Image: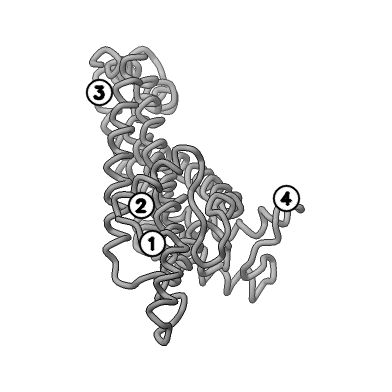
Amino acid sequence: MLRYALNRLVSLGLSLIVASLVIFLVVEVAPGDPASFMLGINAQPDTVAALQAELGLDVPKWQRYLTWVGGMLTGDFGTSYTYRTPVSEMVADRLWISLPLALYALALSTALAFPAALYAASRRGRPGDMAVMGATQLGIAVPNFWFAMLLVLLFAINLGWFSAGGFPGWDDPLAAMKALTLPAIALALPQAAILARVMRSALIDIMAEDFMRTARAKGLTRSQTLWRHGVRNALIPVLTIIGLQFSFLLAGAIIIEQVFFLPGLGRLIFQAISQRDLIVVESVVMLLVFAVILVTFLTDLAYAAVDPRLRRRA
């Protein structure tokens, strides 16, 4: 297990190095100079040059890359060009919205997907299975931002049970969770549909194995066999989807945060791109990439815990 974990750590480190290079190069080659954007089209060249020197944009790109990477290793993500605020503080303020939202949505999607998948797999080919598969197909097809607007129209405008947007802060945890409920549902619906379909397929494959037939021959009912032997063996592809879903929910909620006016990481990236605040874009995207790679690493460790064959191969 230790050797397997070390191998995955080396892969994680190499992935982070490649990701940092790609992010820096992609952001830096984008058209538009931050200093010129901040000063406007009528700014004098000497004024632009002075602001570039103040922001550290007048040094070679390789030096800026090394400074940026070295700062991140020590916890210094730089200073925002627009707000003149440390990027780490901006990320910390917004992470307390995006992270609970991602966890909330992941919990909802898992709570919806697992019972639906078990129900469908235990009734393969019956009307219940077809109903669940039809519902999941609809959940995948419906865009989450459109579903979010429907939720606002129904529960915020017509019924008045929730607010249409905004975030009150964590001083009142109940109000904060209430404000995150509709966004979490909008994010969870397509993820639950995908997870339910994957788990159903995995369970159906497992139920066709010889050890499952042996368990039935020993007197276990179909439900008992499914719970005691099928679920754990079907978890490997499900863990992959759950890990990818958490990464998507953390890094890919830009549109949902815009719909509900949530000041999270997604909205921060959107604003930084529109303002050509390169250091914010680079640092936040790199942080999200690190979160994705870390979740993948933890998922691999979960694989090894569930399937001993991976540890033996390592």
Q: Earlier in the sequence, mark 1 or mark 3?
A: 1
- Comparing labels 2 and 3, the label whose residue is closer to the camera: 2
Disc 1 + disc 2, Cβ < 8 Å: yes
- Secondary structure found at label 3: loop
Q: x and y percent of residue 246 in the render?
A: 44, 44
Q: Are marks 1 and 3 in contact (CB under 8 Å)?
A: no
Which is more N-terminal, label 3 or label 4? Answer: 4
Q: Indicate whether 28 appears above or below 194.
A: below
Q: Does 37 appear above or below 98?
A: below
Q: Nearer the viewer, residue 62 or 150?
A: 62
Q: Amino acid at mark 3?
A: Glu
**In the picture provided, is 79 more to the left or to the right than 172?**
left
- Say which residue appears at 46% left-offset and 75% top-offset: 38
Q: Quadrant of residue 239?
A: top left
Residue 118 in percent (x, y) is at: 42, 37
Closer-to-camera residue (89/152): 89
Reading the image, the residue beneath label 3 is 209
**Crowding at label 3, few (<14), some or many (≥20) Cα neighbours within 10 Å?**
few
Q: Quadrant of the C terminus?
A: top left
**What whole-number distance in Å separates the C-alpha atoms at marks 2 and 3?**
56 Å
* Image quadrant where one finds the N terminus: top left
Q: Position of residue 129 (x, y in %)?
A: 36, 46
| Of labels 4 and 3, the one closer to you | 4
- The residue closer to the viewer here, 308 or 215, is 308
Q: CA distance from mark 4 to mark 2?
A: 41 Å
Residue designated by label 2: 64
Mark 4 or 2, which is nearer the eye? 2
Q: Secondary structure at mark 1?
A: loop
What is the CA distance from the residue labelled 1 to the residue labelled 3?
Answer: 62 Å
- CA–CA distance between discs 1 and 2? 8 Å
Residue 98 relative to residue 209: left or right? right
In the rendered image, which residue does mark 1 sit on?
A: 57
